[in-house]
Amino acid sequence: MKISNQQPNYAQATQTNTKIQHHNVFEGEKEKRMEILREKYTKIHQENLRQRDPEAHIFDKYTNPYSPKFRSDLTAEERNSAKKMELSLLRTNGEMRYFSFRDAAFRDKPLMNGLVENHEKRAFQREQVNNQIGELLKEAGISIPTGTNLTFTVNPNDFSVSVSGSKDELLLRQIEQLLNTEQNGQELYRHIFKSLDVESSQRSEEAERKYSLISTLRTTGYDLSKLERKDGKFLTPDGQDVFELYLNKMRANPYEKNYVMAAASHYGPTYYELAKNGFDALPDLTLSINYADSKLQDVGQQQNYSETGWLTALKNSVR
């Protein structure tokens, strides 16, 4: 399919269910084991509740070798894991919040490798986002010529996407318009961010500190980059210090009021540095990713989550 001079029907495309989503439901080994534990200990919790003293019953099972209830069939580590999970269920009224993968249910299974599991999750999310972008392009009638290597760059302040890498200006403009519909830019940014390796060349302590502050202050309904800077503060249109507005919202929240000092200590230095020296005193965490062969291609790091031969090798090396 060739690119025509006719503009794609973006309204029609965005009426479909196809949108970029950085978070897609993933069921890896961790999630599977959590479900096994949830099912097992929900039943055990009901049994414990039928005892006259559930807590004493749990301690008898796992810490008292002289009790006829003592679980001698378990290892010391397995007994400790079971005890913690059952006590946690008592304290949370049966809601499973604590999971121990040292449970006897996994005695004959290899220990999970957290590094591999994390990479597999990222590769899964990449596959989903690649499919979503492919569907968006298809629905908009956009065909990218074979061999084209594009770069998508996302501004962290407004999540606007710019596209480069082709001499075809119409193609670039069409793709930009498509990626800037709905929440696609924001979702693409979050996907790139979550795909960053710890040693990615796109990361920097200053830029991440600034982005963290901006993201947090968005909960006030204001964009820090668009506020007036005056007398060492960023002011809302009605003259409020946006950082104090954020802290006051925390103070009014019964679940957050105890963390106001921690938030002020964590975000305050960055806020006042920008308020004093200007919004551009710290670099933006602008993120880029290539797009070629119908797949996103990571830049500035060794891991490419669209080409996972390295992940297969890693999995084989830790077996």
Image (tube, helix red, strand yellow):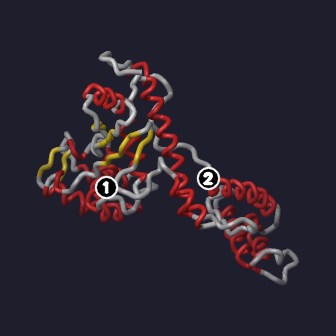
How dense is the environment of label 2, judged by Cα within 10 Å: few (below 14), some, or many (20 and up)?
A: few
Q: Observer-nearest residue: 282 or 178? A: 178
The outermost residue toward the top is 6
Q: Is residue 247 visible?
A: no
Q: Which residue is mark 2?
A: 28
Q: Residue at x 62, y 64 (%)?
A: 112
- Image location of residue 121, percent across then percent down: 54, 52
Q: Residue at x 45, y 23 (%)?
A: 139
Say above or below: 139 vs 238.
Answer: above
Question: For the residue marked with disc 1, what is the amino acid?
Answer: Gln
- Residue 91 lies in quadrant: bottom right
Left or right position of 297 against 124: left
Question: For the residue marked with disc 2, what is the amino acid?
Answer: Gly
- Count the marks: 2
Point out the image quarter for the N terminus.
top left
The outermost residue toward the front is 147
Tag 2 secondary structure = loop
Tag 1 secondary structure = loop
Say above or below: 205 vs 56.
Answer: above
Q: Is residue 292 visible?
A: yes
Q: Residue at x 81, y 83 (%)?
A: 65
- Image location of residue 94, percent across then percent down: 69, 57
- Image location of residue 28, percent across then percent down: 62, 53
Q: Which residue is mark 1?
A: 202
Considering only order in the chain, which callout, 1 or 2, is on the residue closer to the N terminus?
2
Query: Residues under labels 2 and 1: Cα distance?
Result: 28 Å
- Image location of residue 118, percent across then percent down: 53, 57
The outermost residue toward the bottom is 66
Say above or below: 258 vs 129.
Answer: below
Say above or below: 176 vs 304.
Answer: above
Q: Observer-nearest residue: 294 or 7? A: 294
Left or right position of 129 against 78: left
